[in-house]
Image: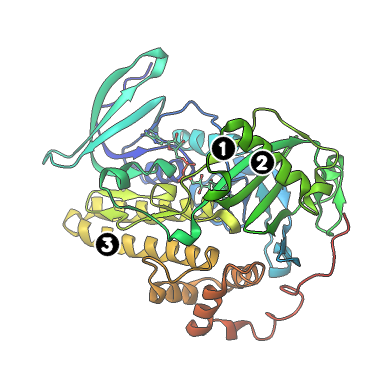
Amino acid sequence: MTAIPQSCDVLIIGGGPAGSSAATHLAQAGIDVVLLERSVFPRNQVGESLIPHIWKFSDMTGVSEKIEQEGFLAKAGGITVWNDKIHQILFSDFGYTRPGLHVERDIFDDILLKHAGCRGARVFNEVSVRAADFSDSQGTKIAYTDKRGHSNLEGAIRCQYVIDASGHSSFLANQFKVRQTISTRFNFLSLWGYYENSRFVGVDRKSYASEALATVKPVTFVMSFEDGWVWHIVLRGKTSVGLIVPTGRTKGMGRQQREEFFKHTCEHLPHLNKLLEPAKFIEGSLQYRPDYSYYSKNVCGENYYCIGDAAAFVDPIFSHGVQNAFYNAAAATLAIKESLKNPKQRFRYSQLCESRMQQFYGFSRALSLGDFGCNGVNPALVKSLMKSLPPLELELILAASEMTSRSENFRLLAREAGVLGRFDDNFSGQKRAPVAALEF
Ligand SMILES: Cc1cc2nc3c(=O)[nH]c(=O)nc-3n(C[C@H](O)[C@H](O)[C@H](O)COP(=O)(O)OP(=O)(O)OC[C@H]3O[C@@H](n4cnc5c(N)ncnc54)[C@H](O)[C@@H]3O)c2cc1C
């Protein structure tokens, strides 16, 4: 068993997409980076629909080829049925030459973490971080429990910088007590599970038996109902189905009742019931995430950076989570690389990064949550990001913002920022028009 070193330049907590890509960025720059991950990989994770934006980040870390070789399902776009209106987006209509993906996240995350190791990061699984002590002038002291080989050994490692990529457990935000819940109107939870042999929605808006995946490109299917929404993401060999509902809907329910509620809701919703007609629920696959939309007042400091879900999380309606994680990892590691070169400027770099990350989270929140005015989004930051986005990405996001009733404030900001005018010639026709019908 490899010994965990006693010191390093950068210590990363968590080996999900945020932590593993941060580790790769740093290791590629020759920085001594240690990553501690409490689970054994591959480990279970939700969030299987990826938008094509991820490729630019996977190119930067050099992992694109490994992702391609795995043969994940390439998705052509998305279809939403929101308040009974049907919209479709196809990435190719916008000029994207690479697809979105439907990935089994245990496999996808494992590829990323192994890649970090290949690039020189020292990765330790089954090591859980317990506390971070920033008071020591010798460097930050990270206390951990090493559970490898059924042991339970306590240890500590010193570092110059800590990256918290611990996902929804928000390790540092909780330690600093800066984690906030987003507005009461958006107190949602998610329930998701897996079905075998579901039909899937194809690029031509027809539904197909799973065998047709060999010849027909799938899309992600999203649908609103009463006070919630549902996703249907076909994978290789199973289909991920998830419900997002207000927390009150499952109040007081035990595991068994939640499962019955989940199955009953999914199997009685229009459209979805047709897709699930031949399908069988995989017993024991139901999972539950109650602590849902949150953010942190501070995500960066002189010697720490919180990235990915450790910093903030919004309703995943636009499949933004992994892209956010990659973006934050790139921004934080750039700031750390510059700080290592020029330590006197470390506070300045951290504040620049803070503003970038809050801008990105604000953008995602404005897009995903109708009640955008609520706690702490800075409209000026969101508008400046809109203005600086590559036209390809901006146009796709603007089209996506038409697909649900969640993004009214986002479109208002886009108008104020003057970015809608850029698409006068193209941004009105087919690409965002509601489509007539589904042929399930
Ligand atoms: C219901 C739901 C649906 C979603 N759907 C999508 C989607 O379709 N598309 C999309 O892009 N995103 C989606 N997301 C979001 C996406 O899953 C996350 O944004 C993404 O996983 C964030 O990556 P991360 O690296 O920040 O965190 P994670 O992937 O959660 O990784 C964090 C890691 O840190 C480890 N860790 C935690 N605490 C410690 C500790 N103390 N010590 C050591 N290790 C620790 C954990 O074991 C874990 O492996 C969804 C999320 C939810 C909840």
Q: Circle 2 — which element?
A: helix
Give the numbered dot on residue 55. Answer: none
Of labels 3 and 1, earlier in sequence is: 1
Determine if the C-beta at disc 3 is less than 8 A from ligand 1: no
Q: Position of residue 258 (x, y in %)?
A: 61, 37
Amino acid type, mark 3: Gln
Callout 1 crowding tier (Cα within 10 Å): few <14, some 14–19, many ≥20:
few
Dot in front, 2 or 3: 2
Residue at 49% x, 36% y: name it.
113
Asked whether, in this view, residue 4 is left or right of residue 134, the answer is right
Can residue 110 be spotted in the picture? yes
Image: 373 above or below 9: below
Amino acid type, mark 2: Phe
Q: Circle 3 — which element?
A: helix
Residue at 49% x, 54% y: name it.
187
Label 1 with label 2: CB-CB less than 8 Å = yes
Asked whether, in this view, residue 164 is left or right of residue 185, the answer is left
- Nearest the viewer among 435 and 53 is 435
Q: Position of residue 259 (x, y in %)?
A: 65, 35
Can residue 71 be spotted in the picture? no
Question: Which residue position is annotated with label 1?
Answer: 253
Image: 54 above or below 405: above
Residue 86 found in image quarter = bottom right
The CA distance from mark 3 to mark 1 is 44 Å
The CA distance from mark 2 to mark 3 is 45 Å
Asked whether, in this view, residue 374 is left or right of residue 304, the answer is right
Q: Position of residue 166 (x, y in %)?
A: 40, 40
Question: Which residue position is annotated with label 3?
Answer: 351
Image: 172 above or below 375: above
Residue at 31% x, 50% y: name it.
305
Q: Kindly give the residue lying farthest to the front in the view shown.
A: 252
Question: Which residue position is annotated with label 2?
Answer: 261
